[in-house]
Image (tube, rainbow, N blue to C red):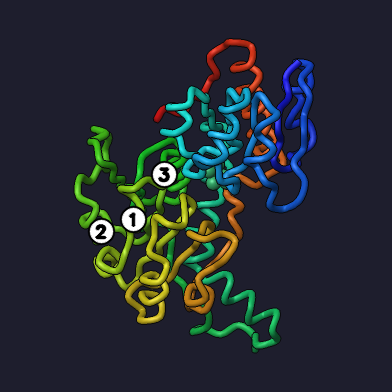
Amino acid sequence: MARVLLTRPVPEGGTDPILDAGHEIVLAEGPAPDLAGLVADVDGVLCMLTDRIDERVLRAGAAARLRVVSVAAVGYDNVDVAEAAALGIVVCNTPGVLDETTADLAFLLILSAGRLASDAERDLRAGRWQGWGITDHLGRDVHGTCLGLVGCGRIARAVARRAEGFGMEVLHHSRTDTGAPGYVAALPELLARSDTVSLHVPLTPSTRHLIGAEELALMKPTAVLVNTARGAVVDEAALARALEKGDIFAAGIDVYSEEPAIDPDLLAAPRTVLLPHIGSASTQTRTAMARMASQAICDVLAGRTPEHLVRA
Ligand code: DGY
């Protein structure tokens, strides 16, 4: 029997694979547990994207008997993957299982940001609504417009499928040519042509601030920016300024560079829908993510290759 550290409680049934395999689960306590201390007594860690699994934590684990870190997320920028590889610790993540739910949320932001749903609801709740007005709460049409996807992974493709139903032209950009219809080799061209730009790239050194002041200036003044990827892909201060100046029309944001802190200028920016990183937040999907992360730990501990290995 092995011991597995669970850094946060997960939805019911999420750790069944670990329990069914007869392993013991140790639940970390408190909002900011000392992971470096806790990993010294476990074989595996099931962590969240909010847990910083850095060199210090990994070395403390490797000095004892830690063999696997499994992140219940597709993004793993919180884990020092190179250090884990150097120490012989396997890192796993949960791609695939959250694609459709995250694409639903991206589409929700495409629609709600474009149609100014948050501003309109705020007015209604604050008692400012005076009745139907032909010039009130005028958003931008989504149907029949051009959607530019930055990234062409599974979530981007799931968003593209939804866009078809809205009669949208769909463009996509990635560093390598997909050979698929709608591929745009140059990011500036995609930004200039799109009515909505939706971001679907992982956070890496090359995607940090991929969308900054220069890129925002290339977008149409009527365009909408949607980010369900990682906050730091966007220069949030530049985004707040672009919204304030009317350089772009609106933004729908689910992820932030310093979560849970939000740049005060972004909070104050007009025409924004801001959600608290709920891209994958459905009971079914969060349970499936936890189960997949749990299964990966069991696989590694049993000497099997897990379905989704992260490579350094
Ligand atoms: C992920 O899995 O990386 C998502 O951000 C979770 O919502």
The residue lying at 53 percent from left, 74 percent from top is 267
Decide: few, some or many residues near mark 1? Use Cα within 10 Å; few <14, some 14-19, many ≥20. many
Query: Looking at the rendering, in which quadrant would you find the C terminus?
Result: top left
Observer-nearest of 39 and 234:
39
Q: Taking 307 as reference, is 10 above or below it? A: below
Could you tell me residue 82's position as x and y percent? 41, 33
Numbered tag placed on residue 146 in the rendering: 1
Please say if the residues under marks 1 and 3 sit with CB atoms less than 8 Å apart: no
Query: Looking at the rendering, in which quadrant would you find the N terminus?
Result: top right
Residue type for callout 1? Cys
In the figure, is residue 242 to the left or right of 5?
A: left
Q: How far apart are marks 2 and 3 (CA)?
A: 23 Å
Q: What element carries label 2?
A: helix
Q: Which of marks 1 and 3 is nearer the N terminus?
A: 1
Q: What element carries label 3?
A: loop
The residue lying at 24 percent from left, 52 percent from top is 187
Numbered tag placed on residue 193 in the rendering: 2
Q: Ligand 1 within 8 A of label 1's CB? A: no
In the figure, is residue 30 to the left or right of 278?
A: right
Observer-nearest of 71 and 155:
71
Q: Is mark 1 on a helix, strand or loop?
A: strand
Per the image, the residue denoted by label 3 is: 202
The residue lying at 38 percent from left, 64 percent from top is 235
Decide: few, some or many residues near mark 2? Use Cα within 10 Å; few <14, some 14-19, many ≥20. some
Could you tell me residue 234's position as x and y percent? 39, 60
Q: From where the camera sits, is residue 288 visible?
A: no
Q: Taking 311 as reference, is 12 above or below it? A: below
Q: Distance between the residues labelled 2 and 1?
A: 7 Å
Residue type for callout 2? Arg
